Structure formats: structure tokens, C-alpha cells
Amino acid sequence: MTVRVLVPVDDSLAAHRALQYIIKMKEQMPMSVTLMIVVPMSQLEYHGFQQSQLEAITAQTIAHCEKVVEKHRLKLEKSGVLADTRVERGNPAEAICRVAVSEGVDFVIISPNGSGKLSNMMFGSVANKVVQECSQPVFLLR
């Protein structure tokens, strides 16, 4: 039986840890992997750019995110793990939870980015929010 897994990624060490785990586990647990990256639109809009500037920055950001997620997909493919990709816009934790439910994944594999205990305590991390809010099971890698 193939397990459907959603893996939120970026270009951090945490994302690379998640990919290494999937590669390591591919023989024990066949997986259908969806790699997902979320463009946090509120952070772009917060800076008060003019609409034309915001559109240009958004297009560049999405293009960069597509390259990042494709790089991860190729890494998995090279290791024998098939994956598809998607780029979403919005609040990262909310988007991850929404896609996990809409795609009916068996679980989410996420690794915190290690921004620091104080920062996580004050603001929370995407990984912590996904663990708390996602209705699908979440596998948190440290």
C-alpha cells in the first residue's frame, strides 16, 4: 500500500532533513509524495509596495519557489521516490492544513526550521501551527 504524504518545503536545512528522511524510509514505506511551498503573501503586502511593484515581486517570488520545489522533486526522483509539486499562496500553516485535507493525504511530514526557542515561544513556528491545527496526522521531524 502506498502512503500519500504532504511535505512542506523551502530552501532550509529543515526541508533537506525531511527529504533525507523520505529517501531513507522509501523501502520500508512506499510513498506518494507531494512537495509544497507556500508564498506568504501577507508578508509581501505588509511592506506597502505599490500594486505594480507587488505584482513584480510576487511573480519573482513564485518563480523562485517553483525552482526550489522542483530542485527537491528532482532530488527525490534521483533517489527513486516519485513526487509532484505545488506552489500555494497565503498563510503557510493554513495552506498546508487546507491542502492536506483537500488532497486527503495520510499524513504531513514537516521539520521545524530551528529559528530558536524564544522566537517560537513568542510568535510560533509554521511547524508548531501545523501540528496544532491540521486535522490530518502530522509527523514532526527534529
Image (spheres, grey):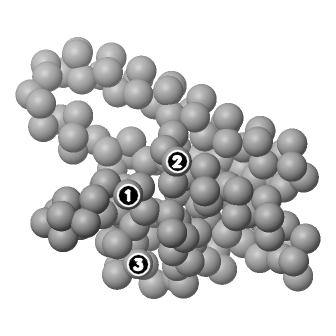
Instruction: Give the farthest residue toward the front.
Output: 117
Instruction: Give the amino acid type for the residue marked by disc 3 in the picture.
Output: Val
Q: Which mark is residue 13?
A: 2
Q: Earlier in the sequence, mark 1 or mark 2?
A: 2
Q: Position of residue 73 (x, y in %)?
A: 72, 43
> Label 2: few (<14), some or many (≥20) within 10 Å?
some
Q: Secondary structure at mark 2?
A: helix
On screen, 88 above or below 32?
above
For the N terminus, the quadrant is: bottom right
Nearest to viewer (mark 3 / mark 1): 1
| Residue at the (86%, 49%) spot, across then down | 79
Q: Look at the numbered discs 1 and 2 and tell me whether their residues touch, using CB distance below 8 Å.
A: yes
Q: Secondary structure at mark 3?
A: helix
Q: Secondary structure at mark 1?
A: loop
Q: Which mark is residue 114?
A: 1
Q: On the image, which quarter does residue 137 sit in?
A: bottom right
On screen, 5 above or below 95?
below
Q: Look at the numbered discs 3 and 1 and tell me whether their residues touch, using CB distance below 8 Å.
A: no
Q: Earlier in the sequence, mark 3 or mark 2?
A: 2
In the displayed structure, does residue 73 sit left or right of residue 126?
A: right
Q: Which mark is residue 131?
A: 3
Q: How many marks?
A: 3
Instruction: Give the amino acid type for the residue marked by disc 2 in the picture.
Output: Leu
